[in-house]
Image (cartoon, rainbow, N blue to C red):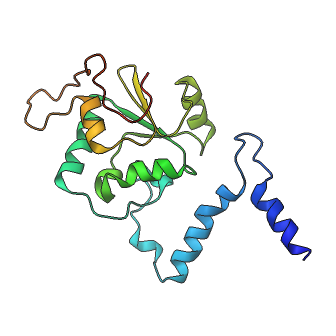
Amino acid sequence: MAVRPRLLLLLRGPFHAALRRPLVSVGVPLLSAVLLAAAGVRAESAPPVGHSTTPTLGQAIQPSNANQLALSEHLRRVGAVFYGAWWCPACFKQKNLFGQEAGNRLPYVECDKSEAGRERCRAADIKAYPTWELNGRRVEGVQTLEELKAWSGYNPRGSSGAAIPPGPGSSGTAGAIR
């Protein structure tokens, strides 16, 4: 009986002072690594550090298809930026929508692994994760690939590759737009 109240205390708090999130979220990546090791998944099967722009978000589950790869490259080319945090499940979900290869090529900024990343996100006034930014326009929350295509002006048949801002009221996104 004495262990149970301590466990409940751990699950309810304490909070990380800087981020005000439960410490339990810090243990999720560690628990995932332990479970993968127990299942026989070897570290060599993951891409080497430095080959992914999003190594802190984990590896996407499925391989990318041609459409996912093309959208990822388009977002990089037009200057879109994906702001996120390593502990954010919505950020992993966003990356996972692109598949493995395209997810590893996203124009990603990690907002909570280093002081430099935290400062870059503070300077950009990032208030929610994930946040996408392009030419001063933002969308917050997980965006579908179709929403990102519309928001960024993606046209696979077009030749310019330039971002075309959506008209008033035509964003069609589920997230907040600024």
How many numbered marks have been drawn onto this rendered protein structure?
0
Residue 74 shows in the view: yes
Position of the C terminus, as image quadrant, is top left
Residue occupying image coordinates x 39% and y 36%:
174
In this picture, residue 120 sits left or right of residue 139: right
Q: Can you tell which quarter of the image residue 133 is in? A: top left
Pick the front one: 175 or 30:
175
Residue occupying image coordinates x 56% and y 69%:
32
Q: Can you tell which quarter of the image residue 136 is in? A: top left
- Residue 80, compared with residue 67, is above or below; it is above
In this picture, residue 82 sits left or right of residue 56: left
In this picture, residue 60 sits left or right of residue 34: left
- Residue 131, compared with residue 99, is above or below; it is above
Residue 51 shows in the view: no
In this picture, residue 124 sits left or right of residue 24: left
Position of the N terminus, as image quadrant, is bottom right
Q: Can you tell which quarter of the image residue 41 is in? A: bottom left
Residue occupying image coordinates x 25% and y 18%:
167
Query: Which residue sits furthest top?
Result: 168
Residue occupying image coordinates x 47% and y 72%:
43
Q: Position of residue 95 (x, y in %)?
A: 39, 50
- Residue 102, compared with residue 117, is above or below; it is below
Q: Position of residue 45 (x, y in %)?
A: 39, 72
Q: Position of residue 82 (x, y in %)?
A: 42, 37
- Residue 153, compared with residue 6, is above or below; it is above
Q: Position of residue 84 (x, y in %)?
A: 50, 41
